[in-house]
Image (cartoon, rainbow, N blue to C red):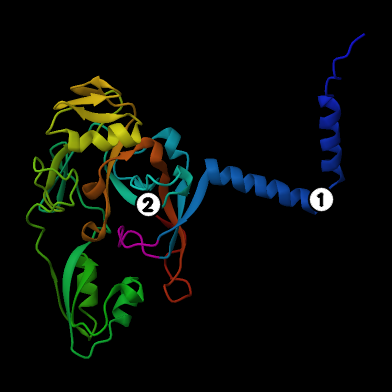
Amino acid sequence: MNDRPPTPDHGQRATGLLGRWHALNDWVKAFVIALMVLALGHFFVLRWVTVRSTSMYATLLPGDVVGVARWATWTGFRRGDIAVFRDPVQDDRTMASRQLLVKRIVGLPGDKVELRDGRLFVNGEAVADAPGRTRSYMVRLKRDADPAGLLHQLGLPPDFLQPDRTIVELPLNAELAKAIMQRPEVVSAEPLRGATGAPSHIFPYSPYAPWNSDDYGPITVPARGDTVPINAATIPLYDRLIARYEGNQLETVKNSLHINGVEADGYVVRQDYYFVLGDSRHYSADSRYWGFVPADHLVGRATFVLMSAEPGGGMRAGRWLKGL
């Protein structure tokens, strides 16, 4: 006598599901299929991101809705790409819940990146600025000036400046400075000097790297398979990479460094990393402040602006289907 339970009839179950699908109204079927296509497209083809900050000004404006090509995570990124990625610093959140950031890739895995008085060099060669790149300008306004019209012209939010100020700092380039000088309330617009000193909030937060936001590096971007040295001088560069991004236990035991309980003077990097900067260098928290972007944090490449919303409502003219 066979006391075993009957084997589930998967064919019958499939037939039942198929029958329920055929029983649905054609409009419901179309809606379900559309949702599935949108979901697949969102995760594998194209997704939309709204720009909130001024870190990529004036390439991207607050309120821009940007199309992000997801396939770049499989086909690869190029130097100069505008990348969208998960915030590497938000370790207390799951990857999916971390904030999305938008910056320009200036250093690929293995590249040597350096800033000299704000000028970018990669592998020893000067790199031309992106067309929209901006820096801090000191703008002097007339005493009774209302900066609202000026901010609107520049595409900046109304709360970007404090009220009742006649000397303001704005992200500009030579072209934008020339344009705002035509406004009656603007007296002058001059670029500020580059940064000086070695502030403690600059990555890798080490006396061995006395850099600032305009004079930075040289620093080599880690690549998968690289063996990086581990010692007192280099550990500030790689401790986050080893412990946070690649999940190892890093500790000091009797004046020596141990990885996963084993004394180490080197570490083999498991994935590629990237170095990113905002086009608005003086208004961007980027790799100069928190280090490298791991490859598994990348979401895609920003390819075009679909449309752009004004801070106070309405749509900006001239930013529909704008290529990047």
Quarter containing the N terminus:
top right
x 14%, y 28%: residue:
231
* Viewer-proximal residue among 184 and 258: 258
* Viewer-proximal residue among 7 and 262: 262
Residue furthest to the top? 1
Instruction: Give the crowd class for mark 1: few <14, some 14-19, many >=20 residues within 10 Å.
Output: few
Classify residue 303 as left or right of residue 254. right
In the depicted structure, whether residue 189 falls above or below residue 96? below
Q: Earlier in the sequence, mark 1 or mark 2?
A: 1
Q: Amino acid at mark 1?
A: Asp
Residue 136 horizontal/vertical position (percent): 18, 65
Look at the numbered disc 1 and give the secondary structure of its residue.
Answer: helix
Classify residue 239 as left or right of residue 310. left
Residue 276 marker: none
Residue 26 marker: 1
Residue 194 horizontal/vertical position (percent): 10, 59
Contact (CB < 8 A) between labels 1 and 2? no
In the depicted structure, whether residue 121 falls above or below residue 65? above
Magenta stretch bounds: 52-62
Look at the numbered disc 2 and give the secondary structure of its residue.
Answer: strand
x 43%, y 76%: residue:
312
Residue 54 lies within the magenta run: yes
**Tag 2 residue:** 101
The span from disc 1 to disc 2 (Cα, nearest Å) is 40 Å
